[in-house]
Every structure is written in structure tokens, then in C-alpha cells.
């Protein structure tokens, strides 16, 4: 065990925090979705890096290899990526609807508009 | 490098730049997946993250505008929250097992069985495919249904624009209808190969990296390339939305139906051993069929979502 053996987790955490920061600090809804995607990708990288075995090869059976990386995280992440794009599409379509309703995708503007509407009622 | 790109994404305020950088970020992470032996995953990430997500985000930007307003709050509070959370997580990793050690707990429990037994039990070389389609067949069916549900959500939110009536022909101005002849010729040259490649990935997923998810996305990319070059109306003639929607449901039906057929043959739900008198042949057949179902659904859902976004964009 050396100092670099946990390096993969640290990269994952840096990415995850970058995504998290975008989600909470940015007022723009499209950028929030991008941040959410970065967060997601960091989780993907965490799983895949956990599945790696040093000296192993891709988990496809070949004659000249005995050691394979772990196929289970690959399966989980493979399906997660496709679901991620589907949910991203859903999020983006929500953004489009919000734009139509409020003519803005900035969080502050939307809050101001809906407050004004509440007061008018 | 990935971290640098991610931070650049956070910093830039011009959303167009942000989205393009996000595409680069996806491509970089796909490369990392190759290095980490996850070829199937890299394949998917390159096609989905760098291809389809970027196109969808660009389509959204057309409707919503390109610039982010400067934030009104001071970024210090979120930054503090993020730093504290990050520090906590790093402290948590100190107990984690080191990178790439074969003795890690992740690599045992069920994973051993998948690596050692799957070539004999399922009879196909690609372990990822055999785990995906056979051992964890229920999960994958759930994922396909989630993708299908997301399509339903998108359609109920923005819907697909109806085709223009033939009685009101679009302006036959050749300058606006055929703006980029070079791109169009290139697209015509590329599209058959993309579709051929998608089919190869679909049916060769047992032996090499690939499978229904990847093939579906690549197939959808071919249609999207066509739409980008020839306009939505022509693309809707090529792949009518009605047919696409039916296909997306058909894929789920094929998957779920395979389970029912194996039950009728005396096995459990999604137990492919019952599909044929020879269990190995049954597994092979079952995986091929459900991968086909996955491929059809994913391709149809991606095309339909793209049509919905593109229709929104053209209306503006």
C-alpha cells in the first residue's frame, strides 16, 4: 500500500465536488444539469476504478489470460450511463417547459416571478 | 486532466462553451474507462456522453439562450459546503482498500462466480454481456423500462411536433433547404457505415465489447446525423415518429416476452436454459433475443427524444 493507492478516490471526490458546487452555486438550470452529469460521471469512475485489477485484462475470455478485471461494476455502470442520458433528457425537457412558462432559466428570476404571481393572487 | 476540464466547465459562464467542454469531458472519461479495462462501458460513454447528451444539450440551448447570468449570491458559502463535504469524503477513503488489489472485497462474493463459472454456464466469452443479460436479467429489464418511462416523460412534457401537412409545402427555396452540400455528401457516405457498425456491435456483443445498449445508441446517432444535415421533416419521413414509438414499446415487449416464453417452457422467468433442450444453446439464444429487444428500445427512445427536442428547436 503506497500513497498513490487511494489516488483514484481522490480524483473521484474532486470531480464529485466540482459537480456538487455547480449544482448548488449556479443559478442557471442548464448548468445545474451539466453539474449533475459531472457528479454522475464521478460515481461511474469510482465504480470502474474499484473493478480494476492490476495486471488483469478486460473481462472477455481469451486463451492467454487468467486474470480479469471485475465484470460486475462494468455491468452496473453500463446500464447506469444509458439511464443517465434518459434522465438528462427528461431534465432538459423540464428546462424547456420552464423557459416557456417563465421566459427564463435563471433560478433567481423564476423565484421572483412566482413570488410576484403569488402576491397578485 | 479530467479534473481540469471539470473545473473549466464550472468556471465558464458561456453555456455553449460549457456544453462543448462537457463533451470533451465525456470523451476523456471514456478513455479512462478503456485504461481501466472497462471496454463495454467506454463504448457506451463515448457514444452517449460525447454524442447524444451533447446534442440534446445544444438543442436545449437553442431554445433557452446561451448566456448564464452572473450569480447574485456570493460563491463563498457553497464553496465552504463543498470543501467540508470533500474533506469528509477524503477522510472516509483512508479506510478504503488500495487501487487494483485483487484481494479487495469487491472482487469476491459474487464476482468470483461470474468470472470463473460464466464461460461454462453461459458459454459466451464476454462476461459483461453474460452478467448483464443472464445473471442480472431482471435488473437490465428494469433499466430498459426506466429508459422507456423517461421517453414517456419527455413526450408528455414537450411532445413530438407533427409532420407538416403536404398541402402546405415548405418553402422550396433551394438555398435554404440545402445549405451545406459538403456536409450532406459526407453524411450520406458515413451513415451506412454507422448503421452497419451498429448492427455489428449488436450481434457481436457476445464475443467482443458491445451489446444492445451501445448498438441502440450508435444506430440513433446515425439517424441524428441525418436529421442534422437534412432537416427534421426529411428525417421524419425516414423514421416516422409513429413507427419509432411503436418500436420503443416493442423492444420492452420482446424482453418481457422472452421471460414469459421461458416460463411457458417450464423454467423460471428469464431462465434461458428452458428455451432449448441444450442449456448453453438456450442461454445463447435468450441473450441474443433480449439484446435485440434492448437495442430496439434504446435506439427508438433516443431517436424519439431527439425528435422531440429538434421539433421544439425548429418552432422557435
Image: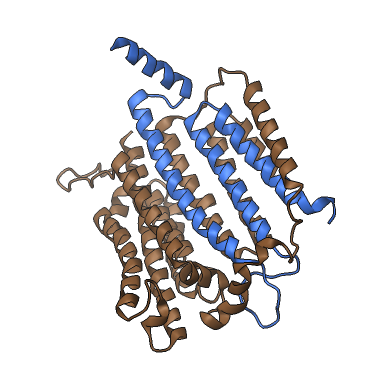
Vertical comparison of B205 with B221: above or below: below
From the viewer's perspective, tell me whether residue B16 is left or right of residue B228: right
Query: Which chain is blue in the rendering?
Result: A
The reply to whether residue A92 is visible in this rendering is yes
Q: Where does the image place residue B176, in percent across and percent down from the top left?
A: 34, 42
Query: Which chain is brown in the rendering?
Result: B
Residue appearing at x 56%, y 29% in the figure: A24
Q: In which quarter of the image is residue B105?
A: bottom right
Residue appearing at x 39%, y 72% in the figure: B270
Vertical comparison of A92 with B132: above or below: above
The foreground one among B2 and B269 is B269
Q: Where does the image place residue B247, in percent across and percent down from the top left?
A: 30, 61
The outermost residue toward the right is A2
Q: Where does the image place residue B162, in percent across and percent down from the top left?
A: 23, 45
Q: Where does the image place residue B53, in percent across and percent down from the top left?
A: 48, 47
From the viewer's perspective, tell me whether residue B294 is left or right of residue A73: left
Q: Quadrant of residue A22?
A: top right
From the viewer's perspective, tell me whether residue A6 is left or right of residue B159: right
Residue appearing at x 68%, y 42% in the figure: A13
The foreground one among B240 and B171 is B240
Amino acid at each position: 500500500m503506497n500513497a498513490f493507492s487511494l489516488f483514484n478516490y481522490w480524483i473521484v471526490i474532486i470531480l464529485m465536488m466540482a459537480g456538487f458546487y455547480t449544482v448548488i452555486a449556479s443559478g442557471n438550470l442548464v448548468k445545474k444539469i451539466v453539474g449533475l452529469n459531472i457528479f454522475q460521471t464521478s460515481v461511474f469512475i469510482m465504480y470502474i476504478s474499484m473493478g480494476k485489477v492490476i495486471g488483469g485484462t478486460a473481462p472477455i475470455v481469451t486463451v492467454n489470460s487468467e486474470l480479469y478485471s471485475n465484470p460486475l461494476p462494468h455491468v452496473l455502470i453500463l446500464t447506469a450511463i444509458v439511464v443517465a442520458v434518459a434522465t438528462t433528457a427528461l431534465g432538459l425537457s423540464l428546462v424547456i417547459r420552464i423557459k416557456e412558462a417563465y421566459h427564463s432559466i435563471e433560478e433567481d428570476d423564476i423565484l421572483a416571478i412566482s413570488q410576484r404571481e403569488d402576491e397578485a393572487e | 486532466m479530467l479534473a481540469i476540464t471539470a473545473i473549466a466547465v464550472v468556471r465558464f459562464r458561456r453555456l455553449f462553451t460549457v456544453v462543448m467542454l462537457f463533451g470533451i469531458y465525456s470523451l476523456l472519461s471514456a478513455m479512462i474507462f478503456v485504461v481501466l479495462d472497462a471496454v463495454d462501458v467506454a463504448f457506451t460513454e463515448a457514444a452517449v456522453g460525447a454524442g447524444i447528451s451533447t446534442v440534446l444539450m445544444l438543442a436545449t440551448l437553442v431554445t433557452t439562450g446561451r448566456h448564464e447570468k452572473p450569480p447574485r449570491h456570493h460563491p463563498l458559502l457553497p464553496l465552504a459546503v463543498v470543501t467540508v463535504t470533500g474533506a469528509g469524503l477524503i477522510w472516509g477513503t483512508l479506510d478504503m482498500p488500495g487501487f487494483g488489489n485483487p484481494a479487495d472485497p469487491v472482487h469476491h462474493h459474487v464476482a468470483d462466480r461470474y468470472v470463473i463459472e460464466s464461460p461454462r454456464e453461459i458459454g459466451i466469452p464476454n462476461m459483461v454481456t453474460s452478467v448483464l443479460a443472464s445473471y442480472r436479467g431482471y435488473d437490465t429489464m428494469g433499466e430498459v423500462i426506466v429508459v422507456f418511462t423517461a421517453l414517456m416523460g419527455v413526450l408528455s412534457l414537450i411532445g413530438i411536433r407533427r409532420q407538416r401537412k403536404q398541402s402546405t409545402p415548405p418553402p422550396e427555396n433551394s438555398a435554404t433547404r440545402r445549405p451545406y452540400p459538403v456536409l450532406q455528401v459526407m453524411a450520406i457516405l458515413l451513415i451506412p457505415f454507422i448503421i452497419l457498425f451498429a448492427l455489428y456491435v449488436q450481434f457481436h456483443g457476445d464475443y467482443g465489447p458491445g451489446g444492445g445498449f451501445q448498438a441502440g445508441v450508435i444506430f440513433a446517432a446515425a439517424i441524428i446525423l441525418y436529421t442534422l444535415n437534412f432537416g427534421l421533416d426529411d428525417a421524419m419521413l425516414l423514421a416516422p415518429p409513429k413507427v419509432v414509438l411503436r418500436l420503443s414499446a416493442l423492444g420492452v415487449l420482446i424482453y418481457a416476452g422472452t421471460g414469459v416464453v421461458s416460463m411457458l417452457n417450464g423454467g423460471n422467468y428469464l431462465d434461458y436454459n428452458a428455451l432449448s433442450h441444450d442449456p448453453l444453446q438456450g442461454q445463447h439464444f435468450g441473450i441474443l433475443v433480449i439484446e435485440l429487444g434492448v437495442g430496439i428500445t434504446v435506439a427508438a427512445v433516443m431517436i424519439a427524444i431527439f425528435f422531440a427536442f429538434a421539433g421544439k428547436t425548429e418552432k422557435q
